[in-house]
Image (tube, rainbow, N blue to C red):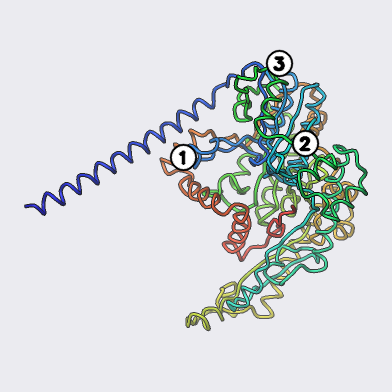
């Protein structure tokens, strides 16, 4: 009997503890929902407020709820889209409640073109006469690129400003495949098409090194330009200081005028209070971008310009668990048709931030864009990347604009398959056998090498798609195919270089593309509407609970992403290729980070 009560009480205790945990989870979930509803309302911005921009938080093209943070109560539950960020900065210029902008400049999670658009918006804000101050314990190089626009850059007395030049580090898997006895079967067009290099080489080819060096030099020239602007030094002096490694400490940053003062955080806060008219013993009124975006509004208009956002790798079919990180052809085509059939939409800006992807999906998307263009003016605005398949879907627009720091081009094609026969035979002791009705009935199976005839067939298919790619570019850009081939070959260019090569029509961000679209459509007053429609926090949370749209998988993805950090991008790219290994691709090489 004593044993019965022992187990009974233990079981009862477990039930009680589980019940309490479930209650906490329930109320946490309901709190996230309530927070989501509240965040959708217009936030109250107090007088003498300061718009706070944290450069370490990534800015996506499409604002998305962070389901994980919404439940756990961590970081803000909603990301703010780039168009909203730029609109918020523009509105703050004339908002009497906003006295200035404060940049938290410890790091910068955004690409070079996004950073450039943000910096130009901040430059425009300065014309209002309001202040911009930047501060961090230590400022990374990419963060300084944006922070240098500030009236004053302050750092911790024992901090530093990083200025060291640019580098691009690529991870190569060929040695690993050798050890596993896995033989990649690679087919490509374009001597600069380096997407497959990590699988077929131990280091960069000369061609890849050449193209990386060229676009790094363009990016570095932009970086040096902002340093010259802030410090008053000439570019030769800046380069000599960087080459000598002369900038290491906070004292160095002050000596060379990269920073304008050494202050602790409390001292910066006192300065901000004085500048914004807040008493020294009162709290600062910071307005976050998440709060401030709720105040954004546009004048009513019967004329709409659609901002059609294509963000992420291009894949076939539906997004599923990849929602928010890919351009899925089926889903995106629905958005194109929705825009095409909406009579209130007079023109379209296709916003492309993509390294490319599936050749077939890119062709299907381009076809729908051609049908859209037959009814409405179509202008493309390029983000951090609009390369390979990303350039493919953009090249036939009426006008194409890129930022100087945009990575574009990469007109080339590749296909990757894997022969794992020796891995299974020699490492695992597994063998395969097959019975077939024709010599190539099992072509593409991973348990045997390709025959020479099969290789010829696949290479011919890749060559044909490359020829189609060139013809699409030639028709859209009104260029000779031979010329397209000369600037193609898989080579990557910056937006600045692409302008000189006639791959784009002008340099500028979304604002210039929107104005160009309005001009082409012959309208002077309009309202910008975004497609796909941003999904609210509450919608995502409810879908996750209902098990719809693979949001449970999305939650798992966010958990993994939080752990892997930047390595998650490389993992995603590798997984995408391996899951679709028998396809032909138009894609950049594993999105190497230039930092």
Q: Where 137 sits versus 566, above or below? A: above
Task: State which quadrant residue 231 falls in.
Answer: top right
**Rendering quarter of residue 228:** top right
Callout 3: SS: loop
Q: Identify residue for label 2.
A: 119
Q: Percent position (x, y) of residue 391?
A: 76, 50
Q: Secondary structure at mark 2?
A: helix
In the rendered view, tell whether residue 275 sits above or below residue 182.
above
Observer-nearest of 429 and 473: 429
Give left or right: position of 409 versus 12: right
Q: CA distance from mark 3 to mark 2?
A: 22 Å
Quadrant in the picture for residue 50: top right
Residue 29 placed where, x, y %? 41, 35
Residue in the image at 80% along x and 26% along y: 126
Query: Which is more toward the observer, 139 or 361?
Result: 139
Element carrying mark 1: helix
Which is more N-terminal, label 2 or label 3? 3
Disc on res. 96: 3
Q: Is residue 73 left or right of residue 14?
A: right
Q: Is residue 495 left or right of residue 283?
A: right
- Could you tell me if the residues under marks 1 and 3 are in contact, i.e. CB atoms within 8 Å? no
**Of the residues under marks 1 and 3, which one precedes in the sequence?**
1
The local crowd at label 1, few if under 14, some if 14 to 19, many if 20 or more residues have their Cα within 10 Å, is: some
* Residue drawn at (68%, 37%) of the image: 308
Q: Which residue is mark 1?
A: 72
Disc 3 packing (10 Å; few <14; some 14–19; many ≥20):
few
Q: Alpha-carbon neighbours of circle 2 within 10 Å: few (<14), some, or many (≥20)? A: many
């Amino acid at each position: 009997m004593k044993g019965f009560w022992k187990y009974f009480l233990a079981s009862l205790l477990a039930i009680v503890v589980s019940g309490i945990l479930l209650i906490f989870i329930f109320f946490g979930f309901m709190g996230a929902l309530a927070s989501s509803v509240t965040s959708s309302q217009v936030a109250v911005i107090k007088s003498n407020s300061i718009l706070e921009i944290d450069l370490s938080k990534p800015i996506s093209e499409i604002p998305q709820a962070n389901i994980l943070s919404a439940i756990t109560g961590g970081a803000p539950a909603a990301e703010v889209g780039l168009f909203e960020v730029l609109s918020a900065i523009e509105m703050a210029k004339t908002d009497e409640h906003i006295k200035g902008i404060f940049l938290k400049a410890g790091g910068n999670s955004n690409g070079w073109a996004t950073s450039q658009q943000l910096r130009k918006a901040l430059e425009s804000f300065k014309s209002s006469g309001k202040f911009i101050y930047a501060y961090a314990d230590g400022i990374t190089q990419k963060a300084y690129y944006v922070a240098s626009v500030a009236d004053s850059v302050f750092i911790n007395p024992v901090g530093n400003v990083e200025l060291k030049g640019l580098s691009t580090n690529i991870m190569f898997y060929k040695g690993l495949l050798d050890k596993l006895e896995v033989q990649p079967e690679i087919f490509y067009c374009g001597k600069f098409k380096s997407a497959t290099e990590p699988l077929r080489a131990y280091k960069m080819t000369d061609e890849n090194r050449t193209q990386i060096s060229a676009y790094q030099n363009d990016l570095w020239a932009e970086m040096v330009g902002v340093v010259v602007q802030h410090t008053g030094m000439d570019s030769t002096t800046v380069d000599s200081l960087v080459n000598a490694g002369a900038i290491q400490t906070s004292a160095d940053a002050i000596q060379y005028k990269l920073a304008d003062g050494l202050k602790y955080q409390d001292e910066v806060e006192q300065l901000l209070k004085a500048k914004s008219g807040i008493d020294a013993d009162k709290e600062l009124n910071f307005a976050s971008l998440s709060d401030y975006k709720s105040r954004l509004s546009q004048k009513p208009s019967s004329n709409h310009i659609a901002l059609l956002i294509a963000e992420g790798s291009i894949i076939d079919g539906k997004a599923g668990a990849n929602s928010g990180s890919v351009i899925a052809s089926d889903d995106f085509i629905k958005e194109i048709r929705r825009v095409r059939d909406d009579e209130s939409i007079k023109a379209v800006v296709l916003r492309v931030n993509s390294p490319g992807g599936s050749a077939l999906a890119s062709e299907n998307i381009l076809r729908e864009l051609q049908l859209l263009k037959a009814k409405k003016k179509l202008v493309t605005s390029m983000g951090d990347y609009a390369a390979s398949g990303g350039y493919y879907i953009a090249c036939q627009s009426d006008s194409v604009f890129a930022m100087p720091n945009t990575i574009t081009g990469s007109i080339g094609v590749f296909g990757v398959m894997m022969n794992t026969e020796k891995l299974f035979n020699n490492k695992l002791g597994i063998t395969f056998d097959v019975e077939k009705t024709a010599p190539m009935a099992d072509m593409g199976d991973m348990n045997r090498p390709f025959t020479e005839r099969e290789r010829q067939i696949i290479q011919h298919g890749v060559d044909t798609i490359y020829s189609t790619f060139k013809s699409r570019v030639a028709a859209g850009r009104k260029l000779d195919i031979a010329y397209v081939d000369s600037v193609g070959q898989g080579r990557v260019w910056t937006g600045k270089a692409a302008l000189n090569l006639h791959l784009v029509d002008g340099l500028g961000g979304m604002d210039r593309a929107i104005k160009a679209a309005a001009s082409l459509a012959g309208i002077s007053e309009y309202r910008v509407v975004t497609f796909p429609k941003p999904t609210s926090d509450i919608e995502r949370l409810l879908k996750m609970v209902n098990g719809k749209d693979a949001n449970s998988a999305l939650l798992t993805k966010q958990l993994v992403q939080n752990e892997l950090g930047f390595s998650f991008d490389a993992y995603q790219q590798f997984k995408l290729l391996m899951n679709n290994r028998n396809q032909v691709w138009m894609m950049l090489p594993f999105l190497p980070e230039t930092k």
